[in-house]
Every structure is written in structure tokens, then in C-alpha cells.
């Protein structure tokens, strides 16, 4: 069995784990907010030191590929690529929305076989990144950015129970009022849950090119200017037009 370093930075939670023989042997998680630029490097350093101190050779690196936070994904993927290249081990990309389903499948036996899963990542306002899976994690609708209202998922809700979870689901609870809608709280993409997906990818030789791999952002990054800069620019333009 492989020893895998797992890195997850797609949301405000930053987590790193090491698994060996399907067991989590190291884990660090910071859920206090987007502090990935500092915490990710520290956690990865601690993970590698732990593996080395126990004479455990690293066999692969797995990273959450997105969608999610643009900055968070870049930090995590850059770190993963650096370790994979430096250690000369393969790199595995794990779809973030699929990763969100792992703890649901592991810890919620009450979910019926015919249920559908809609993992959601917050994309600000009433927009989320989401996909529709069956219970076997076969995608029934591809990943896309959804502006959520009461009818967004009606096609699926009319068929039977649909479970919504992830940091984008909570804000949708008041909007999605269909009687078949179910919400699971406390589900976040975590490095310790990446193993089943990473191991499956490795067994199928589904690795990515370490040099050229890029995260799955779904949407292009749009830089915004701080409000004080915008005010100054507006004032300058107003002054120029009046002169």
C-alpha cells in the first residue's frame, strides 16, 4: 500500500494529512480562516518530517484540484507540485466536490440508495460551485456555477431525496424549500478524507503532469480594487471632468 501526502486548500479550511496502508498517520487542520499561505507550508513541513522520522518513504502526493478559492487552490497546488517534483513521486489531482462526498458516504448510513448528492462550495452571494451525483458518485450533471433559487435543482428534487452539503449549502437552506431537500451540516473538504479517491486514481495510473498541471478554477479570477483606491480613482476622474 502507498504512503500518500494529501493537501487540501480549496476553501477557508487548510488541511494536510499523511496516509499509509489506508490509515491516517498524520493530520493537521486549520479551520480559522484563509491563512493558507502560512499554514500550508508549516503543515507540509511537519508531515514530511513525521514521515522521515518514522522511516516511511513517500509514494505520492495528492492535492484537491478545485473548484474553490482561487488563491487557496494556487497555494495548495504549488505546494503539492513542489513536493512531488522534489521527491520525484507522482502527483494525483482529487476533485474537490467528489472529496466532499467521502465523509457523507463514510458516516451517514441512513441515506437511501436512491438519494442524490449535491456537494456545494460557496462562490459568494447566492452562487455556488456544485455537481449532481448519484450515491455511487457517478455525475448526473457536470460541475458548474449555479445561482441558487428555489427552482435551481427542482428537476432532481422532483425525483426523490437530494442531499446538499458543503460550505455553500448552508446559505441555500432558506432558498431551497422542496420537501425532498435534505441538508447535512459540518461537511468540509479535508485532507484526511482524500485517501480513497487518491488511492483509486493511483491504482488506475491516473496521475497528472507535475510541471503543467493547473487547478480547476471553473471561473476566471477577477481582481478587485480596495474601496479606498476606488474612491480615490472616482474622485480623480470627477475632478478631471470638472476642470
Image: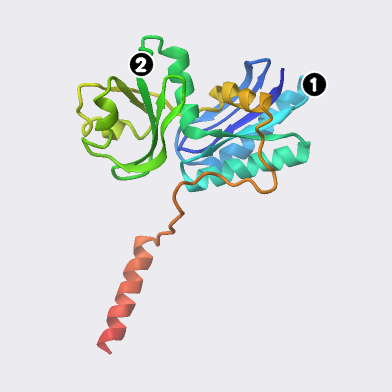
Can I make out residue 189 in this image?
no
Question: Which of the image's four quarters has the N terminus?
Answer: top right
Give the percent coordinates (x, y) of residue 174: 21, 31
Residue found farthest to the top: 110
Sequence-wise, the earlier of marks 1 and 2 is 1
Q: Residue at x 69, y 30 (%)?
A: 205
Q: Are marks 1 and 2 in contact (CB under 8 Å)?
A: no
Decide: is 116 above or below 125: above
Decide: is 173 above or below 226: above
Q: Secondary structure at mark 2?
A: loop
Q: CA distance from mark 1 to mark 2?
A: 45 Å
Can I make out residue 136 in this image?
yes
Depth check, mark 1 against mark 2: the one in front is 2
Tally of marks:
2
Q: Residue at x 36, y 9 (%)?
A: 110
Picture quadrant of residue 158: top left
Q: Secondary structure at mark 1?
A: loop
Give the percent coordinates (x, y) of residue 122: 37, 39
Q: Residue at x 27, y 20 (%)?
A: 160
Between 212 and 221, which is closer to the camera in this rendering?
212
Determine which residue is flagged by label 2: 114
Picture quadrant of residue 169: top left
Q: Residue at x 44, y 13 (%)?
A: 107
Q: What colour scheme has been applied to the protein in the rendered image? A: rainbow
Horizontal side of 111 relative to 106 (left or right) equals left
Query: In the drawing, what numbered circle is on residue 55?
Result: 1
Q: Mark 1: few, some, or many residues within 10 Å (few <14, many ≥20)?
A: few
Decide: is 219 above or below 10: below
Question: Which of the image's four quarters has the C terminus?
Answer: bottom left
Q: Mark 2: few, some, or many residues within 10 Å (few <14, many ≥20)?
A: few
Residue found farthest to the bottom: 243
Amino acid at each position: 500500500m502507498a504512503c500518500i501526502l494529501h493537501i487540501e486548500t480549496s476553501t477557508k479550511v487548510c488541511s494536510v494529512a499523511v496516509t499509509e496502508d489506508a490509515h491516517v498517520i498524520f493530520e493537521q487542520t486549520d479551520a480559522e480562516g484563509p491563512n493558507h499561505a502560512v499554514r500550508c507550508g508549516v503543515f507540509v513541513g511537519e508531515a514530511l518530517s513525521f514521515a522521515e522520522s518514522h522511516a516511511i518513504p513517500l509514494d505520492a502526493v495528492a492535492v484537491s484540484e478545485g473548484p474553490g478559492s482561487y488563491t487557496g487552490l494556487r497555494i495548495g497546488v504549488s505546494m503539492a507540485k513542489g513536493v512531488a517534483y522534489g521527491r520525484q513521486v507522482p502527483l494525483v489531482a482529487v476533485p474537490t466536490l467528489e472529496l466532499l462526498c467521502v465523509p457523507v458516504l463514510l458516516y451517514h448510513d441512513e441515506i437511501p440508495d436512491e438519494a442524490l448528492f449535491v456537494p456545494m462550495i460557496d462562490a459568494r452571494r447566492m452562487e455556488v460551485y456544485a455537481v449532481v451525483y448519484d450515491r455511487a458518485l457517478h455525475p448526473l450533471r457536470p460541475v458548474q456555477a449555479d445561482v441558487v433559487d428555489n427552482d435551481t435543482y427542482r428537476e432532481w428534487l422532483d425525483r426523490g431525496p437530494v442531499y446538499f452539503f458543503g460550505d455553500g449549502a448552508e446559505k441555500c437552506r432558506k432558498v431551497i424549500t422542496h420537501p425532498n431537500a435534505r441538508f447535512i451540516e459540518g461537511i468540509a473538504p479535508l485532507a484526511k478524507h482524500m485517501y480513497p479517491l487518491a488511492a483509486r486514481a493511483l491504482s488506475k495510473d491516473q496521475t497528472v503532469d507535475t510541471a503543467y498541471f493547473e487547478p480547476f478554477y471553473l471561473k476566471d479570477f477577477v481582481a478587485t480594487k480596495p474601496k479606498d483606491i476606488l474612491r480615490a480613482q472616482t474622485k480623480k476622474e470627477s475632478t478631471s471632468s470638472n476642470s
